[in-house]
Amino acid sequence: MRKIITVLTIVISIPSFGQNHFIGLKGGINWTNVNSSNFISDNDNRTGFNSGLTYQHFLNERFNLGIDLLYFQRGFTNDIVFTDEFGNPTGESATSEFNYDYLSLPLKGGIVVGDKFTGFANLGIITSFLLDAKTITPAIEGFQEETTNNVTDRVTKFDLGGLVEIGASYKITPDFLLSATFGYQHSFTSITNDNYFSNGEVRHYGTVLSVGLKYALKKE
């Protein structure tokens, strides 16, 4: 945690030489799932959220760099469909939840088009550190109660992924920038290991919709 904050502070403190620096807050909604082999299949999205700090550095009128420090929820859900003694669906179901919460550090850069109202497109990488991982098994009447299993010590702690995002920004004033972003993320690394579903590989992916408000530290 200290290393991440130090890196963010160093980036923000780089002399601007007349270029623009914005820092602020952002947050939004995530729809995540997993690609997997030899794991649970037919999964549904987990709807989670992200929130934290954001920093943007305009290299010039056409290119920008950015870095975020976010609490980021990932995971997926899986429906248990009940059947009768003949194997026919009864119409009843229950949902198991697989929740993985991270501290994420997206680093990205790309092109910017416009002035007061701008559009942008970025590519980047995301390093993430696991904070909490839980599996929630639903209650089944007459059979079991809802149970929550903490698997934080078993899941791989580090995750590395890539991202692509597009969005738009609007300068409310010369000092304040309002932005909206839609992005797609996909992990390169698996959350599995020798202690957690060792016979398969599981990688996060998902879409993100977020908004942010930034303040100009220094402007042209």
Image (cartoon, rainbow, N blue to C red):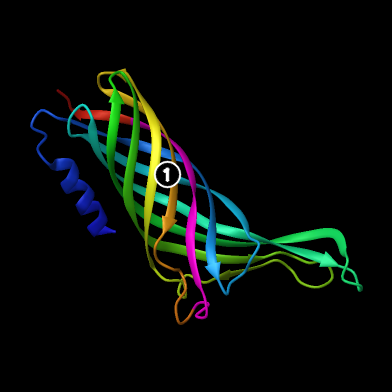
Q: Secondary structure at mark 1?
A: strand
Name above or below for residue 57 compared with residue 190. above
Q: Quickly name the residue at label 1.
A: 51
Where the N terminus falls, by quadrant? bottom left
Question: 104 and 33: which one is in front?
Answer: 33
Side of 41 relative to 134 (left or right): right
- Residue occupying the point 26% across, 37% down: 56
Name above or below for residue 219 compared with residue 37. above
Give percent across and percent down for residue 86. 91, 72
Q: Quadrant of residue 81?
A: bottom right
The stretch in magenta equals 196-213
- Based on the picture, tell me whether residue 163 belongs to the magenta stretch: no
- Based on the picture, tell me whether residue 208 belongs to the magenta stretch: yes
Give percent across and percent down for residue 30. 51, 46
- Residue occupying the point 48% across, 59% down: 204
Side of 85 relative to 213 (left or right): right
Side of 17 relative to 178 (left or right): left
- Residue occupying the point 33% across, 40% down: 122
Give percent across and percent down for residue 169. 36, 26
Give percent across and percent down for residue 9. 19, 47
Could you classify mark 1 by the number of other residues whose Cα lies within 10 Å: few (under 14), some (14-19), or many (20 or more)? many
Where the C terminus falls, by quadrant? top left
Magenta stretch mostly in which secondary structure? Answer: strand
Side of 177 relative to 12 (left or right): right
Name above or below for residue 181 compared with residue 7. above
Residue type beneath disc 1: Ser
Q: Quadrant of residue 94?
A: bottom right
